[in-house]
Image (spheres, rainbow, N blue to C red):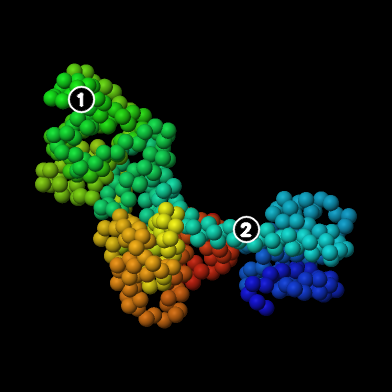
Amino acid sequence: MNHNTPKLLIVEDDAGLQKQLRWCFDGMEVLQASHRTEALALLRRHEPQVVLQDLGLPPDAEGVSEGFATLQQMLALAPQTKVIVMTGNADKDNPVRAVGLGAWDFFPKPVETDALKLIVGRAFHVAELERQNRSLRQAHGPMPLEGIIATDPQMLKVCRMVEKVATTNASVLVLGESGTGKELIARALHTHSDRAANRFVAINCAAIPEQLLESELFGYEKGAFTGAAKTTPGKIEMAEGGTLFLDEIGDMPLSLQSKLLRFLQARVIDRVGGRHEIPVDVRVVCATHQDLPALIEAKQFRQDLYYRISEVSLTLPPLRSRPSDAVVLARAILHRAAQELPRAPKSFTDDALKAIQSHPWPGNVRELENKVRSAAIMASGAQLTADDLGLASGAESVAVLNLKTVRTRAERQAVEQALAMTGGNVSHSAELLGVTRPTLYDLLEKLQIRPENAS
């Protein structure tokens, strides 16, 4: 049978009816079982999309207890499978009970083949639509937070922390190399907080001269200095009720650090040239690529301010430590570029993808975006190559490995990423991977992976 041929499992102990049903569905790959143990074994091995099951199975062929037990076990093992139960013509209560337990549909005996073909065909159609939907969700990479593209377990752990911290008013310090997406994380904290309806105000402490930074942050009164023609609120006031993002906090001058500390402690500010305090309700998120403890040691950063801004610290891993994310990000960047540039390539060649995975990306996501967008503008081929990206071909960097080793590594990476996305939930991980729970349990056992939340 072709691997695309629909698989139908028929669970029926009547040999005559088995033969009739096999003939009825001769265009499909028909599997047959006459009792529960055999049915479950075939379900695990062949993963049929649709099951046609009689409720009267041995050793309770005259009753329904064995049939219901079989139904429940099959749905527990393969919840995506469409199970159609067959019942006696006069039986009204058991079909309803079966559907309540998760059966997809029911059909009365004696069998009318035309009607049964219609029901089974519809079940296959729905199963295929659901499979395509799962594949599309997987291909587009179900993302943990809006605006954040991540599949790597390290980054997914950060995203789970963001979800937990966002609903609090804790001050958050985001650490990471330049270009790792610290502002995106800060925006995610704002978006998922109770302050999302109010403003997100960002200021780069390294981009503004020291003499102007104080007035930018705290505002100034009319006449406070030459050129102060009117009273102007600062960034802190502008963020009232929302979130203030202080990027590159490690570059803030010491003279301003004490004033920021006072604001964080008292939640009031004094404008430059002002004579009264102004209360401000704002959530503060800071970020830096610098080593703040080293700056504290060098007397360039206040230790008390460090403790005040880092009630929660989030460290973003560099792109070189999450090569699978590099490919996912590159595809997303190219997709956006292709929408803006109609003639841009829509995909990467294999050597380009290998090069993206093997490149160290010292500039992290910012460098990746620059490379992909530049290549999309300049390339003339149907696909972006490693040459277009200005990267060494990744083909040479891939070691010659035993096929079994390559497969095992790929399986381990996929399973670990799925578990990381779902917090260790086996059912949801199986859905993400497009496999049944029993298949995933077999993989977990083979790879010796113990999920955090085996459910």
Q: Which mark is residue 220?
A: 1
Residue on which the image places disc 2: 130
Residue lying at 45% horizontally and 73% vertically, measured from the top left: 408
Near-viewer residue (408 or 134):
134
Q: Quadrant of the N terminus?
A: bottom right
Residue lying at 36% horizontally and 42% vertically, measured from the top left: 187
Q: Quadrant of residue 296?
A: top left
* Residue 41 visible in the picture: no
Q: Nearer the viewer, mark 1 or mark 2?
A: 1
Q: Is 335 left, or right, of 396 in this rendering? A: right
Q: Residues within 10 Å of mark 1 (few under 14, many from 20)?
A: many
Q: Quadrant of residue 376?
A: bottom left
Q: Residues within 10 Å of mark 2 (few under 14, many from 20)?
A: few
Near-viewer residue (42 or 126):
126
Residue lying at 63% horizontally and 75% vertically, measured from the top left: 3
Identify residue type, mark 2.
Answer: Glu
Residue at the extreme left: 298
Total residue callouts? 2
Near-viewer residue (237 or 52):
237
